[in-house]
Amino acid sequence: MSDQTPVVGVLVASPAELSVMQQATAILEKLGVPHEVRVVSAARNPDAVDEYTRTAFERGLKVLVCTTGISGHLASAAAARTVLPVVGVPIASEQMGGEQALYVTAQMPSGVPVATVGVDAAVNAAILAAEIVGVADPDVQARLWKFKDDLAEGLRL
């Protein structure tokens, strides 16, 4: 990660979900998008989630990427407490199947939107977060165009 101020916050509800979310941080690094990662459970430490999400905008974050899995619905807790876009990553586990996690992430109540990617699709969540940042950042936008050109040429992520 660079020394720049993070613009993407990656919230992971459980250390067990870190391996999936490392795919997101790898893409953000490849695209040169400054980010930070926090492991925080909405169920075990709701005050920390509240503090992080309520202050995210003032700290310069532009978008949050959050997991939904065995530790509760972190994405919904974040979305309820911020005006920033929230991208939810449903995480499959033995306790909660992929379809169940996907449904929980996508079916948010009216007024509390969470953009939802596929099950364990942390790569897509990172790309979506970078696209959101890229709307106002021409450098990130240029790197995204290069990234997508490389994909079209059949190069690997």
Image (cartoon, helix red, strand yellow):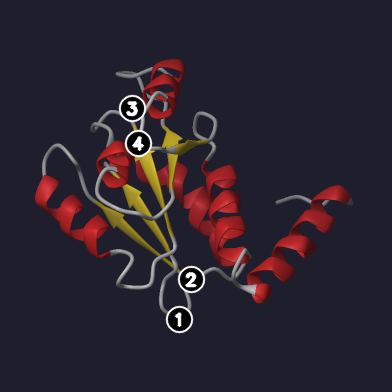
Q: Is residue 20 above or below residue 136?
A: above
Q: Position of residue 11 (x, y in %)?
A: 33, 51
Seen as rendered, the residue at the extreme right is 153
* Residue carrying label 4: 111
* Residue carrying label 1: 4
* Residue carrying label 3: 109
What is the crowding at mark 1: few (fewer than 14 residues within 10 Å), some, or many (at least 20)? few
* Residue carrying label 2: 34
Q: Are marks 1 and 2 in contact (CB under 8 Å)?
A: yes
Of badges 2 and 3, nearer the viewer stands 3
Mark 3 secondary-structure assignment: loop
Seen as rendered, the residue at the extreme front is 111
Mark 2 secondary-structure assignment: loop
Residue type, numbered disc 4: Gly
Seen as rendered, the residue at the extreme bottom is 3
Of badges 1 and 4, nearer the viewer stands 4
Of badges 2 and 4, nearer the viewer stands 4
